[in-house]
Image (cartoon, grey):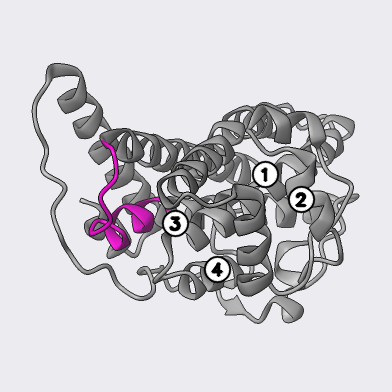
Amino acid sequence: MAVDVLSTKDGHAKTAKSRAYASVWKTARTTGEVIEIGRSIPPDHPARPRQPELLSPRNVPKRKPGSPAGRIALLHAVAHIELNAVDLHWDIISRFAHVPMPMGFYDDWVKAADDEAKHFNLICDCLETMGSYYGALPAHDGMWRAASDTANDLQGRLAIVPMVLEARGLDVTPGMIEIFEKAGETAAVESLKTIYSEEVSHVAYGAKWFNFGCGRDNSDPKEVFHALVKRYFKGGLKPPFNEEKRADAGLPPDFYWPLAEELPAYVR
């Protein structure tokens, strides 16, 4: 199921499969049906639609959200992030299926993939209401770089994707909500609030299973996190941090403040 999602090009078809497979999983878990955790080789890079054009992060035009065009560009970037997140969550399931993990691990990442598919569709609806669509503007492929860099390291993947990249979303989303509130874009505000509330759990899933892995290895989570971020993440973490939401997700300040520097362009 995971590899089928990863191999689907069209964004709406990909998210439809993500939601359908999540429903199959949830129903099976509720009824006691056993779905085997199989083995299947995921693609090195998920299938993508022909549009948007993917540019180097530094070549993507700057977003100026004070104008309608700027707000469309901002929402387009959010849609791109959400579609990447769908693939990231199915990828962690398929790529690390050889690592023995409790069934709760799969429950969490299937749920996260379902959420991200919903988020993509919400933002696409907003774009269409504003006279645009996903694929109308260029985007970048920076998020998948983190997946490639951690393709052979489950702890590294957990540290970088949910605990760094998705945690960054908790920092910046309140500002985006404020931009659309000022513009009177109520549909975008409600969609971003939904994303904001549900992303906390995705960061929490990362922290939970990262700590689980450290416990199994009898290693110190904070020390391991710092070492992995320095190994896989180019640059440091950019304050200000949303300390309240990060705490809700199980990220204490001594995890991220010692790493506070400048973020690479593809995360700004």
Q: Which residue is mark 2?
A: 256
Q: Earlier in the sequence, mark 3 or mark 4?
A: 3
Determine whether label 4 and label 1 are within 8 Å by CB: no
Determine whether label 3 and label 1 are within 8 Å by CB: no
Q: Amino acid at mark 4?
A: Ala
Location of residue 210 with respect to 52 vertically, above or below: above
Q: Which residue is mark 1?
A: 130
Q: Amino acid at mark 3?
A: Leu
Any mark on residue 88, and which?
3
Q: Earlier in the sequence, mark 3 or mark 1?
A: 3
Q: CA distance from mark 3 to mark 1?
A: 28 Å
Any mark on residue 121, and which?
none
**Mark 3 crowd level (few <14, some 14–19, many ≥20, 10 Å Cα):** many
- Secondary-structure class at tag 4: helix
**What segment carries the magenta color?**
89-102
Q: Amino acid at mark 2?
A: Tyr
Of circles 1 and 2, the one toward us is 2
Q: Earlier in the sequence, mark 1 or mark 2?
A: 1
Q: CA distance from mark 3 to mark 2?
A: 22 Å
Q: Measuring 39% from the left and 71% from the top, which residue is drawn there?
A: 152
Q: Nearer the viewer, residue 122 or 145?
A: 145
| Residue 47 belongs to the span the image colors magenta | no
Q: Which residue is mark 4?
A: 146
Q: Is residue 178 visible in this depiction of the protein?
A: yes
Q: Earlier in the sequence, mark 2 or mark 4?
A: 4
